[in-house]
Image (cartoon, rainbow, N blue to C red):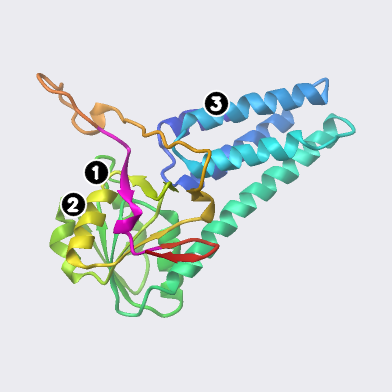
Amino acid sequence: MINEAVEEIEEMQTSSSSSVAIKATRALESLLDREFTTVDEFERDLERNVSALRRANPSHASLQNAMLEVKDAVTTREYDDIEDAKRGTREVIDGVVEGIEKGKRRAAENAVDLLEDGMTILTHDYSTTVLEAIEQAIAEGMYLDVYVTEGRPRYLGRRTARTLAGYDPIDVTLITDGACGHYLDECDRVVTGMTCIVDDVLYNRVGTFPIATAADNAGTPMTVVGSGTKIVEEGFVFENDFRPASEVMLEPAEGFEIGNPAYDATPVELVDSVVTDEKNREF
């Protein structure tokens, strides 16, 4: 299960950073079915697999934080025997997952305060926290118009559009990433998720920076939504991921190279507000 989780995370088959953190944390449960002779052996195996899951995607702050939280909580406890260690580990895993889910849910709840009935918003790519915020807004009786960028080259925005199309009442328009500037004058707010914020730089799915720049030029406020654990003050260096060229073009690249970064960097000064489970921060 852990090897499968590592492969899936490396291939970005799970698109939401919160979902990645939960998947990695739950994958550690497979260790509870293994046989160990000593608690030390169990803890060494836990640390080895935590390291493997962390290496699968160094750019996801929520994944890194979740893995370190599990490792630190488990290895600093005293246990009577292997079964006691396994019970303690299960409690830790459940607690970490619950914390991620609560943080995401509360961030979505706080984001609803910035939405109003009849508002037109633009969102980029795919964010489960943004989707949850929109779903909660609709449950409160709001009607929304939503523009969704495709999120090229993986087109995860199409997944967002299909999900939103199932909500009622809501009007959804899927647009190409490059068309955002054409529609921003019609939008009251841009709302996106985030991979992480490090040293006042927002790292998110590629295409976020051009949208933030265009929104700033158009005078359209931009809000970023996510768990507070994604805001890292120190001890974390963001590492971009460069995806296969085949995602951009299937034909051979003859005489030129193909660049396909997974994330881009946006100065937070281009963002009007960051909404987390802990607080709303305005710039």
Q: In screen coordinates, is 168 left or right of 65?
A: left
Q: Residue at image x 26%, y 33%?
A: 260
Is 95 in front, or is 239?
239
Residue 206, image x, y percentages: 29, 43
* Residue 247 against residue 267 in the figure, above or below: above
Q: Secondary structure at mark 3?
A: helix
For badge 1, the amino acid type reads Arg
Q: Secondary structure at mark 1?
A: loop
* Residue 33 against residue 168 in the figure, above or below: above
Q: Earlier in the sequence, mark 2 or mark 1?
A: 1
- In which image quadrant can residue 73 be found? top right
**Residue 272 is inside the magenta segment:** yes
For badge 3, the amino acid type reads Asn
Q: Which residue is mark 3?
A: 3
Residue 233, image x, y percentages: 51, 47
For badge 2, the amino acid type reads Thr
Q: Earlier in the sequence, mark 3 or mark 1?
A: 3
Specify the segment rendered in magenta.
Answer: 260-273
Is 58 in front, or is 84?
58
Whether tag 2 and tag 1 are in contact, CB under 8 A, the answer is yes
Q: Is residue 68 in sight in this rendering?
A: yes
Q: Which residue is mark 1?
A: 152
Say few, some or many: other residues with alpha carbon within 10 Å of mark 1 (under 14 / 14 to 19 / 20 or more): many
Residue 4, image x, y percentages: 52, 29
Whether tag 3 and tag 1 are in contact, CB under 8 A, the answer is no
Q: Which residue is mark 2?
A: 176
Is 20 in front, or is 264?
264
**Residue 228 is inside the magenta segment:** no
- In which image quadrant can residue 64 be found? top right
Q: Secondary structure at mark 2?
A: loop
Q: Residue at image x 19%, y 28%?
A: 258
